[in-house]
Amino acid sequence: MRIRIVDAFTDQPFSGNPAGVLLLDSFPEDAWLQRVAAEVNLSETAFAHPLPPGGEADWALRWFTPATEVDMCGHATLATAHVLHTTGTATGTVRFAARCGILLATAETDGTITLDFPTSSLTPVAAPEGLAAALGAEPVAVHDTAAHIGDLVVELADEATVRGLTPDFAALRTLSERGIIATAVADDPEGGYQFVSRGFFPAVGIDEDPVTGSAHTALAPYWSRRFGRDDLTGFQGGARTGLVRTRLRGERTLLNGHAVTVVDGELHA
């Protein structure tokens, strides 16, 4: 069967966030999906199959890290939509049925793809004991996110602090359901992006995720309130980086970015 690796939230190969993508006729047993994701060994591998016409969605979509299945993934959804559109399998807006509900992906005339995801709630919480030591930086504020995400959004003092983090991943593993999103206002908010972030997910087998689309469903409302505007751009990454353009629309958040296919081959399994 055909397998592709797509770099998401970038227009350059070997940057952004890579995801495996397999288009199937139906979903095999979960154990097989998990073994494939472990073999691909990227933050997420997406598996999709077409649904009968006339329903609320066009494709069923699931995502697996090398260690477990997750409820929501932005970059692998962008990667899947990119494969569907670049192969001519789909046009216009694609509707995905996933654990977190119906997700939309629309191909834009400029070559980007816009994802339509549910906006995360944000609940202020006390910093868990050991968080500052595990991150190596003192939190300014900590917020919990909605179901299907399960991250802590941790605001830090400035962009340099976020970029310079060298976390203790073993210590972070027990501090949230899924992961820790460290974020700060950009040094130059009038430049190419208004906020920065890095995502750490050792609890689901990913020490650092380069560009986390789902996290931006929480980062968008967090920073939109601060800046007093709905359209923002976030910069995420450590060794690999990418840009996520966000647009807050009440209960929905739009995430826009490029994607590029870097591997197109066959899976013999």
Image (cartoon, rainbow, N blue to C red):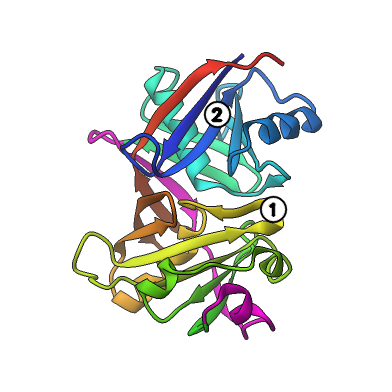
Residue labelled with disc 2: 21
Q: Quadrant of the C terminus?
A: top right
Q: Residues within 10 Å of mark 2 (few under 14, many from 20)?
A: many
Residue name at image x 19 percent, y 68 percent = 190
Residue 125 in magenta stretch: yes
> Which residue is disc 1 drawn over?
204
Identify which residue is drawn at 71% across, 25% down. 27
Q: Does 76 sit left or right of 269 as displayed?
A: left
Q: Which amino acid type is marked by label 2?
A: Val
Q: Which residues are magenta?
A: 108-137
| Residue 229 in view of the camera | yes
The quarter of the displayed image where residue 201 is located: bottom right
Residue 251 seen by the camera: no
SS state under label 1: helix
- Could you tell whether 150 is left or right of 6 in the image? right
Residue 45 position within the rendered picture, expressed as x and y whole percent measured from the top left = 60, 35
Q: Position of residue 186 (x, y in %)?
A: 30, 70
Query: 175 and 101: which one is in front?
Result: 175
Residue type, numbered disc 1: Val
